[in-house]
Amino acid sequence: MSFAELGLHPIILNSLKACGYDAPTPVQSQAIPAALTGVDLLVSSHTGSGKTAAFMLPSLNRLTVESTVKSNGPRILVLTPTRELAMQVDKATFTYGHKLKKFRVACLVGGMPYPAQLKQLQGPVDVVVATPGRLIDHLERGRIDFRRLEVLVLDEADRMLDMGFIEDIEAIVAKTPASRQTLLFSATLDGVVGTMARKITKDAKRIEFASKPELKANIEQRFMFADNMTHKNKLLDAILRDTDIQQALVFTSTKRSADDLSGLLRDQGFAAHALHGDMNQGQRNRTLKGMHDGRTRVLVATDVAARGLDVAGISHVINFDAPRQAEDYVHRIGRTGRAGRTGTAVTLVNPGERGLMRSIERFTGLRAQIDTIAGLEPKITEERSGKKPHPARRGAKPGGYARPGTGAPKPFGAKPFPGSKPYGGAKPAGFKPRPAGSFQARARAGS
Ligand code: AMP
């Protein structure tokens, strides 16, 4: 199927040419024609599925016809949980609609100065992309008029609810016209998301792609606490020197840190390359080829770029930055242990990321096994001292991998990193010197 077959206006198709997309993704193929009919949608889909275009293209299609309502307010409103996502959606929106006449998009997010945002709202605006808190601020000051609003999009609705935005969302929805079309995108449509969806949509069509990703049994999972970024770099360096590593996929949370970290690793002698959404298709293909033929030993990637990556040689996944969503953790570590092999996943957790680790425990239903590398132990050793332990950790023994609450260790049989020991366990065995044929030595030799 092509984009032209989905029923989009030629101006939108013309804008799309700049993106270089060959064909719609599955979520786009289903959501775009449905949204073009004007019905409400509930779509379960993941980041990286092409969901932004799935809601934005049919919404922008409305802008090819002038509004009959006299107002400068937006015709499309997108709510996102985070500033980063809002900025990403803002950028994509501009690309998807840049051929529209006098096309204007405003991005209203927290942590940014008000004057620039007020300036964006002075003239007529077609699309507002916002985080709920900042939008409420503008609404309370009477800066936005929703009289001509046609589409309300809730992007990553589950995350917005996780972040406690329910009341803000309800207050915003109450100010929008009842005639609006509502498009709700979320990783899950169950639980509180489903309850909210029922309240704010009318006869919505459900489109479901995302099911809870499955945790594979052949992947050994470890967590290591880091005090700060320097400590993380040292841990990563030590892990990458492991002779057992064939190829490693290292995840960072931003494109910039993927670039910076891959540069740092190259300086340290590793055959490392970055993979992220800002690279053009040619660059991505070259990098992927390097992974497939084994020339690249360390791929430093963001979630979006690594989705669907299938390279049998990836023996280790290292979460340099812990994933922001627990579900992404399962996707990330699933990049190893492919083609019937076993794999190892290590997540580095700094003090600010311990909440994310707990979300991963809750999501997977497993207790995190915490390791250290001798000589690189964290100074901040017990994050829960004085606090009630998380239920997932109560009664668990070091070195095991227990179902929450059972305390029963679940052996996974793989051997630890050289010099690593379970957190709080026996005296360090000492740091094993790097053998001649080690991973780094091979990388240096240019293999
Ligand atoms: P999203 O899920 O909207 O965050 O999109 C993830 C990535 O997929 C972004 O880098 C988009 O530019 C890209 N993308 C979206 N739709 C397509 C498509 N039809 N073909 C190729 N790439 C796409």
Image: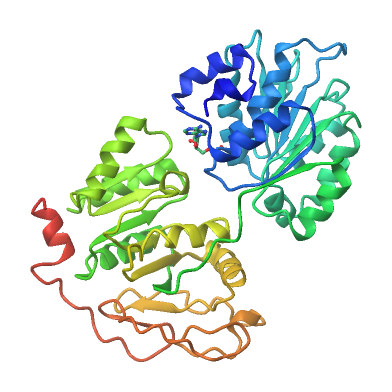
**Looking at this view, is 5 or 68 the one in front?**
5
Relative to 330, does residue 27 appear above or below in the rendering? Answer: above
Residue at left 30%, top 50%?
Answer: 299
Q: Nearer the viewer, residue 192 or 435?
A: 192
- 216 in relation to 38, above or below: below
- Quadrant of residue 392 in the image? bottom right
Q: Residue at x 42, y 65 (%)?
A: 348
Q: Residue at x 67, y 36 (%)?
A: 109
Judging depth in this view, the residue of 115 and 25 nearest the camera is 25
Q: Is residue 285 left or right of residue 76?
A: left
Q: Residue at x 81, y 44 (%)?
A: 169
Q: Name the residue nearer the viewer: 20 or 99.
A: 20
Q: Position of residue 43 (x, y in %)?
A: 69, 44
Q: Is residue 113 visible?
A: no
Q: Residue 251 location in percent, x, y?
A: 40, 54
Quarter of the rendering containing residue 137: top right
Residue 295, image x, y percentages: 18, 49
Q: In the image, residue 280 lies at what x, y percent?
A: 36, 30
Quadrant housing residue 278: top left
